[in-house]
């Protein structure tokens, strides 16, 4: 009996050691923060929905110029009878949750301050590429319309989930093959990924419509979409508008970069 108890004790110690190692690993990659650990110590749920920050907090931490609200986004994309938005949008803005912890927003703001990133919190309405083109075709390149063909419907009609997205608009990892860029993203931590194409285009067009600022003017973003062995590149948001191109997936050019998106905490 004593030997069995000792074995169970050893197994428990080993399990705890593995869990502790994982906690440290996630803390070092910022998947777990000091706020999460303190909540655990206080016997509170570290991921309690009450941690949702409001829009005022986000604007204070990141800066007003780094936040675009659902109301602002609606005014850019929807032309309603009043104030350029559809009825009820003011009420909706109070209901839309920012699905990032306060700690996540603080970390993003710190990286911005240290000139390591260009994190912005943008409301995405979840428009497909086709819907974006239908509403704002003048902002797309007129002679680059291959992606509007019927055979591309599967990804052209894909609709992202609507909500606030935290996106680092500093294009990174140029001059790399996509598989190498993916490895660089994995080093950032499990909460980071390449921004989905429709999300990226809606975001940079929203910024352009509201702030008159051009992002990705002379470079393209690789979101990971591969079609017929070719990788879709989006961006090149210059004078002639947004470009959507396809290139060999193994190609590595300085202007083929990655825009990183932070996954939701809640």
Image (spheres, rainbow, N blue to C red):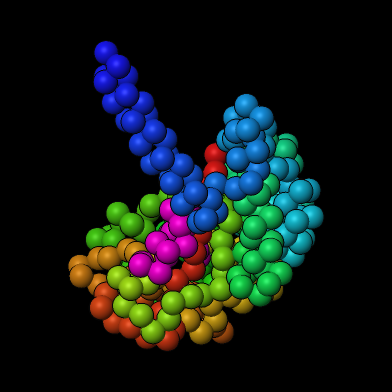
Left or right of 38? Residue 147 is left
Image quadrant of residue 212? Answer: bottom right
Horizontal and vertical percent for residue 243? 44, 76
Q: Decide: is 24 above or below 174.
A: above
Q: Quadrant of the C terminus?
A: top right
Residue drawn where x is 62% and y is 69% of the image? 118
Q: Residue at x 51, y 84 (%)?
A: 218
Q: Quadrant of the N terminus?
A: top left
Q: How many marks?
A: 0
**Residue placed furthest toward the front:** 2
Q: Does the rendering let one see residue 45?
A: yes
Q: Main secondary structure of the magenta part?
A: helix
Query: Can I make out residue 96 in this image?
Result: no
Q: Position of residue 133 (x, y in %)?
A: 47, 63
Q: At 43% from the left edge and 46% from the top edge, which residue is drawn? A: 21
Give coordinates of residue 28: x percent, y percent: 52, 56
What is the span of residues highlighted in magenta in the rendered image? 182-201
Q: Position of residue 240 (x, y in %)?
A: 52, 83
Horizontal side of 246 relative to 117 (left or right) equals left
In front: 131, or 109? 109
For this orientation, the residue located farthest to the left is 228
Residue 242 belongs to magenta span: no
Q: Looking at this view, is 30 or 149 the one in front?
A: 30
Q: Quadrant of residue 91?
A: top right
Near-viewer residue (208 or 98): 98
Name the outermost residue toward the top: 1
The answer to which image quadrant residue 51 occupies is: top right
Q: Could you tell me which residue is drawn at 75 percent across and 56 percent down?
A: 61
């Amino acid at each position: 009996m004593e030997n069995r108890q000792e074995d169970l004790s050893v197994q428990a110690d080993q399990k705890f050691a593995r869990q502790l190692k994982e906690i440290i690993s996630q803390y070092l990659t910022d998947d777990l923060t000091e706020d999460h650990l303190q909540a655990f110590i206080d016997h509170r749920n570290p991921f309690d929905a009450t941690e949702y920050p409001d829009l005022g907090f986000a604007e204070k931490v990141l800066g007003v110029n780094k936040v675009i609200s659902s109301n602002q986004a609606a005014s850019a994309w929807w032309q309603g009878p009043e104030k350029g938005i559809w009825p009820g949008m003011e009420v909706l803005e109070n209901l839309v949750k920012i699905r990032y912890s306060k700690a996540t927003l603080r970390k993003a703001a710190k990286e911005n301050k240290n000139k390591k990133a260009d994190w912005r919190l943008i409301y995405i309405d979840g428009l497909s590429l086709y819907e974006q083109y239908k509403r704002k075709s003048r902002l797309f390149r007129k002679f680059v319309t291959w992606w509007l063909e019927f055979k591309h419907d599967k990804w052209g009609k894909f609709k992202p989930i609507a909500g606030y997205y935290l996106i680092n608009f500093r294009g990174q990892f140029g001059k790399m093959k996509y598989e190498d860029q993916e490895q660089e993203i994995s080093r950032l931590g499990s909460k980071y990924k390449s921004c989905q194409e429709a999300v990226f285009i809606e975001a940079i067009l929203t910024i352009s419509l509201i702030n008159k600022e051009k992002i990705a003017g002379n470079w393209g973003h690789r979101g990971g979409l591969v079609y017929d062995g070719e990788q879709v590149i989006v961006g090149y948001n210059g004078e002639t508008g947004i470009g959507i191109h396809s290139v060999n997936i193994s190609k590595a050019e300085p202007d083929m970069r990655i825009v990183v998106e932070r996954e939701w905490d809640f």
